[in-house]
Image: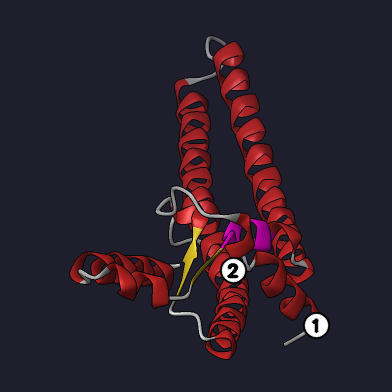
């Protein structure tokens, strides 16, 4: 959505730089609700479903590893007095290694540069590109000067008649 931030900044600059009210009247400005597009567009729903499943599988595995760690820690604590120093050191080492594996798994799968993040980018970028292409095409066809996204928080008020979200969804569902 970096492109939408650029459009918003550009729109704000144009509004401030133009002095005559007649210039505003000639501009064609519309808005969309990107959050609604993502919620109602079937392809976006499918991408979100896949991402939710992937995240759930990673979290399930992570939680199982945490349970295994807790179990091993409880065993060590309950048997601490009965174990020889060598056996106790061995169990502590196992616990420490498991803790490190758990942290590595979390970073590798769920971290900011992990597999989930990469898969999210891989699946959502083509979707965002498609949505942006449709917005650009409709904007060009209809001669809109600016199309703003209300989700970005810049549009404080807009008449519903200027909302082209339904039109964008319609075109996306056609497979444009």
Q: Secondary structure at mark 1?
A: helix
Label 1 and label 2: CA atoms lie apart by 26 Å
Q: Nearer the viewer, residue 73 or 132?
A: 132
**Number of dots carrying numbers:** 2
Residue 52 in which image quadrant:
bottom right
- Do labels 1 and 2 touch, CB within 8 Å? no
Residue identified by numbered label 2:
119
**Viewer-side label of 1, 2:** 1
Residue drawn at 61 percent across, 34 percent down: 66
From which residue to which does the magenta span run?
A: 32-38
Residue identified by numbered label 1:
174
Residue 36's spot in the image, x, y percent?
66, 57
Query: Was residue 35 drawn as part of the magenta stretch in this picture?
Result: yes
In the rendered image, the quadrant that contains the C terminus is bottom right
Residue drawn at 45 percent across, 29 percent down: 89
Graded by Cα atoms within 10 Å as few (under 14), some (14 to 19) or many (20 or more), the crowding at tag 1 reads: few
Residue 6 shows up from this direction: no
Residue 113 in which image quadrant:
bottom left
In the image, farthest residue toward the top: 81
Position of 25 with respect to 80 (left or right) is left
Sequence order check: which comes first, mark 1 or mark 2?
A: 2
């Amino acid at each position: 959505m970096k492109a939408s931030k650029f459009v918003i900044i550009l729109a704000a600059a144009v509004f401030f730089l133009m002095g005559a009210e007649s210039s505003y009247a000639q501009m064609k400005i519309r808005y969309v609700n990107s959050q609604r597009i993502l919620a109602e567009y079937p392809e976006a729903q499918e991408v979100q479903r896949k991402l939710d499943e992937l995240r759930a599988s990673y979290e399930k595995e992570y939680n199982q590893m945490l349970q295994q760690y807790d179990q091993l820690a409880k065993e060590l604590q309950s048997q601490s007095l009965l174990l020889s120093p060598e056996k106790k050191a061995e169990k502590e080492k196992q616990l420490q290694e498991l803790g490190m594996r758990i942290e590595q798994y979390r970073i590798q799968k769920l971290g900011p540069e992990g597999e989930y993040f990469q898969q999210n980018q891989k699946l959502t970028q083509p979707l965002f590109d498609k949505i942006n292409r449709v917005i650009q095409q409709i904007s060009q066809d209809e001669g809109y000067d600016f199309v703003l996204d209300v989700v970005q928080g810049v549009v404080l008020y807009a008449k519903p008649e200027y909302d082209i979200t339904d039109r964008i969804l319609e075109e996306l569902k056609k497979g444009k």
